[in-house]
C-alpha cells in the first residue's frame, strides 16, 4: 500500500488503516443505536408493566404489584440484561457512582426492616424485586450516549405506549375503562388504560405529560406536543380530581421558577405548598380546624374514605415506633386479616395492601426514624440536587423534568402509597426522576459523560 510521507520511515500494516477506522466507527454507531433502543424499551416497560390490561381482576390499585412469577422472573431477566449492557457500554466512572450513599441508605433501612416482618424471607424477596427493577431504571438513564438519544428513544417509546392505550379504549373498552362491575361501581366510565386502576393511571399519565414537555423543549417537538396533549386528555378522563389539581401546580412551579431564574424561590414555594397539601389531607385526622378548611374547599373531605385508613395506620405506628412493622408486612398480616370488621368505617382495613399515604406507610413500615429519613432522601435531597444541576445550562431541561416529577409525587404521596413498591410504575418513574437528579446534581453525568460517543480506536501505523 502507499505509505504517507509523514510515516514513510515506520513499518506498514497488512490491513489499511481506513478499513479499521470504518469498522470501529460502524461498531460505535451500532452500539449507540442498541443502547438507545434499550433505554427506550426500558422506559416503555417501566410504564407499561409486564402485566398490562388486567381488567377488573382486582379493585385495589396496588394489588398488581404483589409477588407473582411473571414479575419475579421477568424483572430478574430484565435486570440481568440491563446490568450486562451497562457493564459493556457505560463509562466505568459513571457505574461507580450509580450506587449513591442515599440509595444505599434507603435500601439498607428497608432490608433491616425485613427482620421485623412476620415473614422476613417473603419481605426480603419483595424488596429484592424493587432493587432489581432499579437496575433497569439506571440503565434507562445511563445507556444513551447523548441526551439527544435519550430524548428521541424515550419519545418514541412513550408515544407508542399512549397510542396503544387510546386504541384499547376503542377495541377493548372493558379492559381500559372502569365498569360498574366489581367493588367500585362509582368509577364506571373513568379511563384507566393498561393499568389496574384510575388512581394509578392518573399520576402515571401526569408524569408522561411532564415527559412530553421535556421532549418538546429538547428537540422532539412534534412528539413532545403529541405526548403532552394526549396525556393531559387521558388524565382528565380518569376522574382523579386531586391529580388534575396537582399536575398544573407542579408544572407551573417549575416553569415559573425557570422563568424568573430562581430555583431556590421555586423550592421554597414548593415546600410551602407541601405543608398546605399535608394539612388539607393527612392533617385532617389530627386537627378539626384543618378538617373544616378541607371541607370548605372540596366536596369529599374524607378522600373517598381514606381518613379512616389514615386513623388506623396512625394509631398502629405507636405499636412499633422505632423499628416499624417490616417491609410489606402490615396490611395483609395475619393480625390485620384476623381483626373483626369495623362497620362504622368507610374502608375494611382487612382487605387493603397499603395505607394510601406514602409517609404514613413509611413510618409504619420502617419506624419513625427510618420512615422520616427515607422520606427526606426521596423528596428533599433531590431538591438540593436540582439546585446543583440548574447551574449547568446544558442540563436544565432534563433537571426541570425530574424535579417536576419529584414535586408532583411529593403531593401525590399524600394520597397514595408507592415507596419501594416493587414494579409499580408510580414508584419506578419517581425513582427515575430522583436517580436522574442525583446524577445531574453530583457531576452533571448526563451531559458530561453521556454526550460523548466512544472514540474509534485508530490503528497504529
Image (cartoon, rainbow, N blue to C red):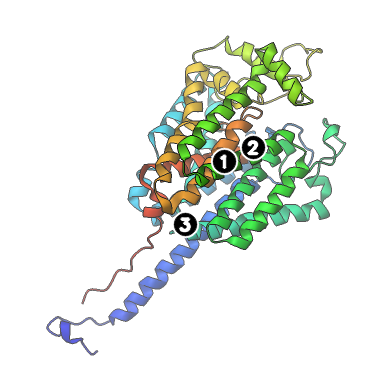
| Above or below 19: residue 259 | above
Residue 147's tag is 3
Position of 84 compared to 228: left or right?
left
Separation of disc 1 and disc 2 at Cα? 28 Å
Label 3 sits on a secondary structure element that is helix
Label 1: state its secondary structure. Answer: helix
Q: Is residue 435 above or below residue 331?
A: below
* Above or below for 440 versus 111: below
Q: Nearer the viewer, mark 3 or mark 2?
A: 3
Residue 47: image location, x then y, percent: 62, 46
Any part of residue 197 in sight: no
Left or right placement of residue 264 versus residue 442 in this view:
right
Q: In the rendered structure, find residue 405 and report the number of the disc placed on it.
A: 1
* Residue on which disc 2 sits: 68
Q: Residue 458 appears in which quarter of the rendering?
A: bottom left
Question: Around disc 1, counting alpha carbons within 10 Å, would you say few (fewer than 14), some (14 to 19), or many (20 or more)?
Answer: many
Instruction: Give the Cα distance between marks 3 and 2.
Output: 35 Å
Amino acid at each position: 500500500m502507499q505509505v504517507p510521507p509523514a510515516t514513510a520511515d515506520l513499518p506498514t500494516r497488512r490491513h489499511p488503516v481506513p478499513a479499521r477506522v470504518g469498522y470501529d466507527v460502524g461498531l460505535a454507531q451500532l452500539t449507540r443505536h442498541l443502547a438507545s433502543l434499550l433505554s427506550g424499551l426500558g422506559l416503555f416497560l417501566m410504564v407499561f408493566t409486564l402485566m398490562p390490561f388486567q381488567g377488573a381482576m382486582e379493585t385495589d390499585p396496588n394489588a398488581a404489584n404483589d409477588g407473582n412469577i411473571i414479575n419475579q422472573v421477568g424483572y430478574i431477566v430484565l435486570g440481568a440484561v440491563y446490568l450486562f449492557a451497562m457493564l459493556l457500554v457505560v463509562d466505568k466512572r459513571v457505574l461507580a457512582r450509580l450506587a449513591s450513599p442515599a440509595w444505599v441508605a434507603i435500601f439498607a433501612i428497608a432490608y433491616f426492616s425485613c427482620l421485623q416482618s412476620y415473614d422476613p424471607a417473603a419481605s426480603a424477596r419483595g424488596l429484592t424485586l424493587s432493587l432489581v427493577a432499579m437496575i433497569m431504571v439506571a440503565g434507562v438513564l445511563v445507556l444513551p450516549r447523548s441526551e439527544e438519544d435519550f430524548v428521541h428513544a424515550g419519545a418514541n417509546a412513550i408515544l407508542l405506549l399512549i397510542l396503544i392505550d387510546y386504541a384499547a379504549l376503542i377495541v377493548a373498552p372493558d379492559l381500559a375503562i372502569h365498569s360498574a362491575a366489581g367493588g367500585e361501581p362509582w368509577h364506571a366510565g373513568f379511563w384507566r388504560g393498561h393499568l389496574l386502576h384510575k388512581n394509578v393511571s392518573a399520576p402515571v399519565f401526569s408524569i408522561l405529560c411532564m415527559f412530553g414537555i421535556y421532549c418538546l423543549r429538547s428537540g422532539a417537538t412534534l412528539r413532545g406536543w403529541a405526548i403532552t396533549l394526549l396525556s393531559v386528555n387521558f388524565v382528565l378522563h380518569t376522574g382523579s380530581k386531586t391529580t388534575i389539581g396537582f399536575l398544573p401546580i407542579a408544572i407551573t412551579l417549575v416553569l415559573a421558577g425557570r422563568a424568573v431564574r430562581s430555583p431556590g424561590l421555586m423550592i421554597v414555594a414548593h415546600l410551602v405548598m407541601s405543608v398546605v397539601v399535608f394539612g388539607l389531607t393527612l392533617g385532617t385526622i389530627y386537627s378539626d380546624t384543618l378538617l373544616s378548611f378541607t371541607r370548605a374547599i372540596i366536596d369529599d373531605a374524607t378522600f373517598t374514605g381514606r381518613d379512616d385508613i389514615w386513623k388506623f395506620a396512625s394509631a398502629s405506628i405507636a405499636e412499633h415506633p422505632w423499628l416499624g412493622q417490616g417491609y410489606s408486612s402490615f396490611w395483609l398480616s395475619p393480625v390485620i386479616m384476623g381483626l373483626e370488621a369495623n362497620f362504622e368505617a368507610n374502608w375494611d382495613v382487612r382487605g387493603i395492601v397499603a395505607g394510601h399515604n406514602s409517609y404514613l406507610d413509611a413510618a409504619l413500615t420502617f419506624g419513625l426514624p427510618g420512615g422520616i429519613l427515607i422520606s427526606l432522601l426521596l423528596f428533599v435531597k433531590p431538591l438540593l440536587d436540582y439546585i446543583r444541576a440548574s447551574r449547568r445550562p446544558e442540563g436544565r431541561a432534563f433537571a426541570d423534568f425530574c424535579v417536576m416529577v419529584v414535586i408532583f409525587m411529593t403531593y401525590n404521596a399524600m394520597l397514595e402509597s408507592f415507596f419501594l413498591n416493587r414494579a409499580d410504575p408510580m414508584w419506578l418513574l419517581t425513582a427515575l426522576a430522583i436517580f436522574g437528579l442525583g446524577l445531574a446534581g453530583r457531576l452533571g453525568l448526563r451531559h458530561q459523560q453521556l454526550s460523548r460517543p466512544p472514540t474509534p480506536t485508530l490503528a497504529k501505523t
